[in-house]
Amino acid sequence: MSRRVADQLGLAYLDTGATYRAATLAILRTGIDPSDQDAVLEELREHSIDYDERGILLDGESVAFAVRSEEVTAAVSMVSAHPRVRAEIVAIQRRWVEHHNRQAVVEGRDIGTVVFPDAAVKVYLTASPLVRATRRASDSEAGGKSIQEIADALAMRDAADSERTASPLRPADDAVVIDTGLMTIDEVVASITALST
């Protein structure tokens, strides 16, 4: 959805969640304990994370599919909960946007509150876990799980992200909140692009 907004506005697009997933993939590939903040941070600094039209890149390798594995999905909240790891990845995200002349659509859970608190347009999309699970059921990431299993996993991730100390999930005070539960993708995209014109 955010990519479609970027395409319509002619802007670069960054999925910041994929940057945390790439970091998690790097950690899992080396066998480091995702709960060890010092080891995770040290390993992360040995890698480059970038984003282009192919999606997320780890050390120049396109890992757009690899970062959606069950193993990465299970560990990404643990890796992203480390405050110093988040600070390192936020710096990567800010450099990426700076490289694109500060003209980009940036998708993520703390963009308006932490990463770009001065963004010109902030949008916070929401929908119930069940609605989101229904939408994700046909994705390859769903892995044949039932809608209820996906909804339960989403609710658990939302709770973990909302309760973490570093950059908890919440809308920015000046964000436009859009409940997408009863909207089509085209309607959501139209609502967002209307805010940017």
Image (cartoon, rainbow, N blue to C red):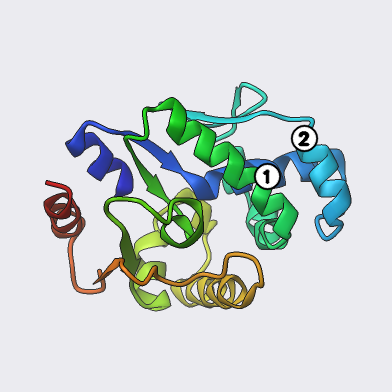
State whether residue 181 is above or below residue 52: below
State whether residue 62 is above or below residue 145: above
In the image, 197 versus 109, the foreground residue is: 197
Residue 114 rendering spot, x and y as whole percentages: 51, 58
Residue type of the residue flagged with mark 2: Arg
Label of residue 45 in the image? 2
Whether tag 1 and tag 2 are in contact, CB under 8 A, the answer is: yes
Q: Earlier in the sequence, mark 1 or mark 2?
A: 2
C-alpha distance separating marks 1 and 2: 8 Å
The residue where tag 1 is placed is 88
Can residue 67 be seen here?
A: no
Asked whether, in this view, residue 94 is left or right of residue 53, the answer is right
In the image, 131 versus 42, the foreground residue is: 42
Residue 82 rendering spot, x and y as whole percentages: 73, 59
Residue type of the residue flagged with mark 1: Glu
Residue 115 rendering spot, x and y as whole percentages: 50, 52
